Image (tube, helix red, strand yellow):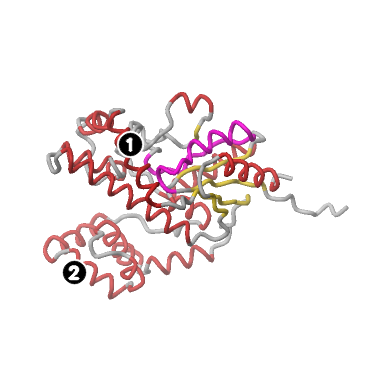
Amino acid sequence: MNGSATKPKANVFCLMGPTASGKTGMAVELVQRFPCQIISVDSAQVYRGLNIGSGKPDQDILDVAPHRLIDIVDPSYAYSASEFRSDAIREIEEVLAAGDTPLLVGGTMLYFKVLRDGLADMPNADPEVRQQIIDTAAEHGWEAVHQQLQEVDPQSAARIHPNDPQRLQRALEVFRVSGKTMSELHREDQQAPGLELPFNLHFLAIQPDDRAVLHQQIERRFRQMLEDGLVAEVEALFSRGDLNHQLPSIKSVGYRQVWQYLSGELDYEEMVEKSIIATRQLAKRQLTWLRSWDGLIPLADPSVNSIDKVLKYMGSTSI
């Protein structure tokens, strides 16, 4: 026997899907039938106090199927994708060390991508450069900022909409601080040693066949969130005084619209309508990500047949 044979990598399973597609229910069923632990992949559920609107599992579910990486930061903190990658790798290693199988579950596709591909080592924010960009936008509009980005980083400019000030500002700031475009930094990151993960990622995704049914589920779920006390939940955040609409936590779908309602920018019916529309748009973006995802195992729905399919796959790869 060859003593130098390398140990096979452990398997890690990722259950993806659009919002309101039934990921949590399927994951809970899987935990009860397979020795796995859930790691949340959700950019809103990381925040304490964002419970109802983020679809965070309640205590009854957590008692049966604990979730890692929920309630880990305060809403005043801007949690990043790079932090998620570090946290997720740590949690995966802990689950594997315990002899269980990691099951990553969520709909934040960027987090899944960053875990799989890594993230370029971007320069830190520069307040002076950032203020210069903001001043340009205030005087000439974000279209002018987009034009400046077009001149130095046409790839990013083509990817970022002129009405997306946060990403425009960051892309131009990165170039002015580092002298390199975001595209160049991403390429360097892909070529950097040590990026390869010490485990195998397997991606499965719920991809509903009928978009109209998903839209109905989204509307039904949001109205249930309102009945469950979503407005009161956001009121508690609103009244803190240290939070604002620019924070990633408050920008989360549903929270942003209720915040606008509490600020007097929207009336109640407008808030409801805009929340449902924004959630449907989120689901559309999620499905777009999934359509181009390499090596994805599709699941039509979270039914018993799909659960059996996942269990069979998990069992076969564990042999």
Q: In what quadrant of the picture does the C terminus appear?
A: top right
Left or right of residue 168, residue 142 in this image? left
Q: How far, Cα to Cα, is label 1 from label 2?
A: 36 Å
Dot 1: within a 10 Å radius of its alpha carbon, few (fewer than 14), some, or many (20 or more) residues?
many
Above or below for 75 versus 274: above
Which quadrant of the structure image shows residue 73?
top left
The segment highlighted magenta reads 18-44
Left or right of residue 286, residue 302 in this image? right
Residue 83, horizontal then vertical, whole percent: 44, 46
- Residue 138 inside the magenta-drawn segment: no
Q: Give the residue number, with chain letter if any, for mark 2.
A: 144
Three-letter code, disc 1 = Gly
Residue at the image point whose x is 33% and y is 31% from the top: 49
Q: Give the residue number, with chain letter if any, for mark 1.
A: 53
Above or below for 212 versus 60: below
Which quadrant of the structure image shows residue 130?
bottom left
Considering the numbered disc 1 on the image, is that residue within a helix, a strand or a loop?
loop
Query: In this orientation, which residue lies closer to the viewer: 115 or 257?
Result: 257
